[in-house]
Image: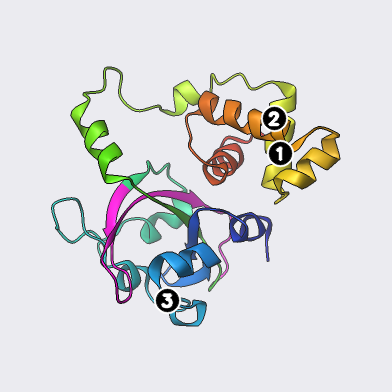
Amino acid sequence: MNMLSEVFAQSTDAVFGIDATGRIRFVNSNFERLLGSSRSQLCGSRCAEVLCGTDMHGQPFCGSHCPIPKTVSLHPPVSDFDLVVKRAHDDPVLVNIGACYTPQQQAGQVSVFFSLRRVNPQRMLQRLAVAPTEGPVGKGMRDQANLTSRETEVLGLATRGMKTTQIAGGLCVSTQTVRTHFKNIYQKIGVHSRTEAVVFALQQGLV
């Protein structure tokens, strides 16, 4: 299991990874719970057939036209997006999805990881109701995050798959101090979870 797989296996987000053909090659336990299917049922299946995603208006989103598997070699930046995905024997669920390309190009290996987070419908309505004045937080703004040396150190340990208690022990600080560092990191780089922060750090070469 490579470094990203180790990180995503412990993520509180639901995470799965696909190869260049769009077949699922990695799932973590939270993705199994979100979809209501087992790892054996999910791995080897095509991403589009598992998610059966639609947009907010019920229009099909997933399918052979999906550009992500087709542009693996280019490693293009992908903005997160909202999607309604199908669950086994349950109601569909609205999620926000982020993508992280990897340098892996071997056949059958994970080329893109996706992290899924449930979207609170009330917060979604609030977000849609407020017209942005400057647009979403973009790469340029994130690059000006100005993380402190300790925040960068904490983020670097997180990319190695270390948990909060392990980071605290390694730095000889309390777990609450580590959580405070993460809170500050999230605010500075414009993300909402440790998985997003790790992906951002790896993509931007911060660690």
Residue 185 horizontal/vertical position (percent): 59, 29
Q: How far apart are the two marked residues, 1 and 2, measured between alpha carbons?
A: 6 Å
104 magenta-colored: yes
Q: Give the image location of residue 174, x and y in percent.
A: 78, 34
Residue bearing mark 2 = 152
**Magenta segment includes 8:** no
The C terminus: image quadrant:
top right
Q: Determine the residue positioned at 19% across, 29% down.
A: 129
- In the rendered view, tell whether residue 6 sits above or below residue 36: above
Label 2 crowd bin: few (<14), some (14–19), many (20+), radius 10 Å = some
Residue 156 is tagged as: 1
Percent of width and height locating residue 153:
74, 32
Mark number, residue 139: none
- Which residue is drawn at the image coordinates 26% and 63% (left, top)? 92
- Whether residue 153 sits left or right of residue 195 in the image: it is right
Which stretch appears magenta?
82-106
Is the Cβ of the residue at disc 1 closer than 8 Å to that at disc 2?
yes
Q: How crowded is the residue under tag 1: few (<14 C-alpha within 10 Å), some, or many (20+)?
A: some
The residue positioned farthest toward the bottom in the image shown: 40
* Disc 2/disc 3 C-alpha distance (Å): 37 Å
Identify the amino acid type marked 1: Gly
Q: How is the image coloured?
A: rainbow
Q: What is the three-letter code of the residue carrying label 2?
A: Thr
Report the residue marked by disc 3: 37
Graded by Cα atoms within 10 Å as few (under 14), some (14 to 19) or many (20 or more), the crowding at tag 3 reads some
Q: Give amino acid for label 3.
A: Ser
**Mark 3: secondary structure:** loop
Q: Is residue 134 above or below residue 114?
A: above
Residue displayed at 56% across by 21% down? 145
* Residue at disc 2, secondary structure: helix
